[in-house]
């Protein structure tokens, strides 16, 4: 699993990582945004104070992704999942995958780097995280607190000065041993 804040590079790195995996197994990649976009009517957005429906839809997204990962892994595929999944949700997701080596990669570019990338994307991903009178940097810092409780295992990688390709090289450099998730 590749996770991190919005604009941390999860989607790009996840796709490149799946393509770079060197082994006999085919590799698949899946981004959680696909399941997020599947709800076309009645979508409830995640906010700092999410509604019960937003929590339910997020749980369904994570469970659907875990089922897909399990299906592919159970059929001999390497599988890379990229999504914003942090705190206890990350541990639950990782623990739900059986019969496969599970790896956790948390992309942690600096808040300034994320703000620069977010501005460059022309998106408003942090709109719900703004406090009255706050800045984009404040909103990012608020969302960054959701990393608290994420298992302190795996590979936490500051990608501030790295290209996506360099990030993937860092991940695979030691055969992904440092990203291996240690089940509790």
Image: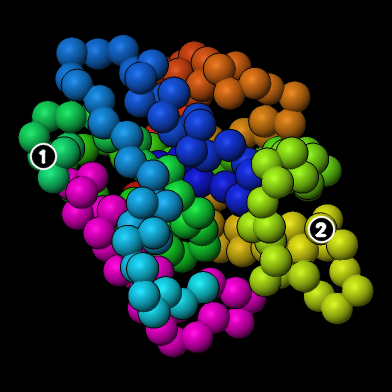
Of residues 48 and 38, the one nearer the viewer is: 38
| Label 1 secondary element | helix
User: Where does residue 163 sit, x and y in percent of width and height?
Assistant: 64, 21
Q: Which residue in the structure is indicated by mark 2?
A: 136
Residue that protrudes farthest toward the right in the picture:
133
Q: Residues within 10 Å of mark 1 (few under 14, many from 20)?
A: some
User: Where does residue 178 sit, x and y in percent of width and height?
Assistant: 48, 29
Q: Which residue in the structure is indicated by mark 1?
A: 74
Q: Judge depth for marks 2 and 1 and give the one in front.
A: 2
Is residue 110 rendered to the left or right of residue 96?
Answer: right
Q: Main secondary structure of the magenta part?
A: helix
Is residue 108 rendered to the left or right of residue 139?
Answer: left
Residue at 68 percent of width and 57 percent of height = 124
User: Could you tell me which quadrant the N terminus lies in?
Assistant: top left
| Label 2 secondary element | helix
Residue that protrudes farthest toward the left in the picture:
75
Magenta span of residues: 46-70
Mark-to-mark CA distance, 2 and 1: 42 Å
Is residue 23 rendered to the left or right of residue 175?
Answer: left
Q: Give above or below for 145 relative to 152.
A: below
How many callouts does the rendering have?
A: 2
């Amino acid at each position: 699993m590749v996770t991190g804040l919005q604009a941390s590079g999860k989607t790009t790195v996840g796709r490149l990582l799946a393509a770079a995996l060197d082994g006999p197994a085919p590799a698949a990649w899946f981004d959680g945004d696909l399941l997020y976009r599947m709800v076309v009517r009645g979508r409830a957005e995640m906010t700092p104070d999410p509604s019960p429906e937003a929590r339910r839809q997020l749980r369904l997204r994570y469970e659907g992704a875990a089922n897909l990962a399990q299906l592919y892994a159970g059929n001999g595929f390497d599988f890379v999942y990229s999504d914003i999944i942090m705190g206890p949700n990350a541990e639950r997701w990782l623990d739900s995958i059986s019969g496969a080596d599970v790896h956790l990669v948390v992309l942690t570019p600096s808040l300034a780097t994320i703000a620069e990338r977010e501005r460059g994307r022309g998106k408003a991903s942090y709109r719900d995280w703004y406090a009255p009178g706050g800045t984009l940097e404040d909103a990012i810092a608020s969302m960054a607190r959701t990393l608290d409780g994420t298992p302190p295992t795996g590979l936490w990688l500051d990608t501030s000065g790295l290209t996506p390709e360099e990030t993937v090289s860092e991940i695979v450099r030691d055969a992904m041993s440092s990203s291996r998730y240690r089940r509790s």
